[in-house]
Amino acid sequence: MCRGVILLTANGEHLCFMGIIYLMLIVSLAIALFFLFSFFWAAKSGQYDDDYSPSVRILFDDEKQSTENQQTDGSTEV
């Protein structure tokens, strides 16, 4: 006896769709556990230790070495 959604086909047979819900539930729980363990592994291995400096690093300019404006005495004034 089917305890889920029943669909009648053209030849009179019925199909039960409740089994696919259980399969989808098991697969989704397995994927969720995979991501949970991946997060704990990343946190334990130090992936999230320094979360401040990458956001501030873009604010600081890199020092550029200018060779096109150098005079013979080594001055880099513009």
Image (cartoon, rainbow, N blue to C red):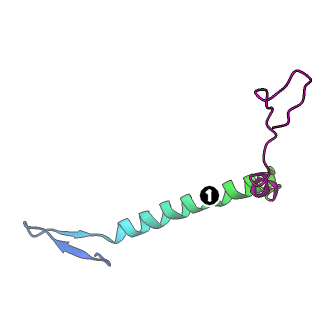
Residue 41: x and y, percent? 74, 53
Residue 39: x and y, percent? 69, 57
Q: Nearer the viewer, residue 16 or 74?
A: 74
Residue 62: x and y, percent? 79, 42
Q: In terms of image quadrants, where is residue 68? A: top right
Amino acid of disc 1: Phe
Secondary structure, mark 1, is helix
Q: Nearer the viewer, residue 3 or 22?
A: 22
Residue 63: x and y, percent? 82, 40
- The quadrant the N terminus occupies is bottom left
Q: Residue at x 62, y 58 (%)?
A: 35
- Answer with left or right where residue 34 lies relative to residue 73: left
Q: Nearer the viewer, residue 73 or 3?
A: 73
**Residue numbers of the magenta segment:** 52-77
Q: Residue at x 77, y 55 (%)?
A: 59
Where 62 falls versus 70 (above or below)? below
Q: Where does label 1 land, which residue?
A: 35
Q: In terms of image quadrants, where is residue 71? A: top right
Q: Is residue 14 magenta?
A: no
Where 49 falls versus 68 (above or below)? below
Where 31 falls versus 19 (above or below)? above
Prevailing secondary structure of the magenta residues: loop
- The quadrant the C terminus occupies is top right
All told, the count of numbered labels is 1
Q: Residue at x 78, y 47 (%)?
A: 61
- Answer with left or right where residue 37 lies relative to residue 60: left
In the image, farthest residue toward the left: 11
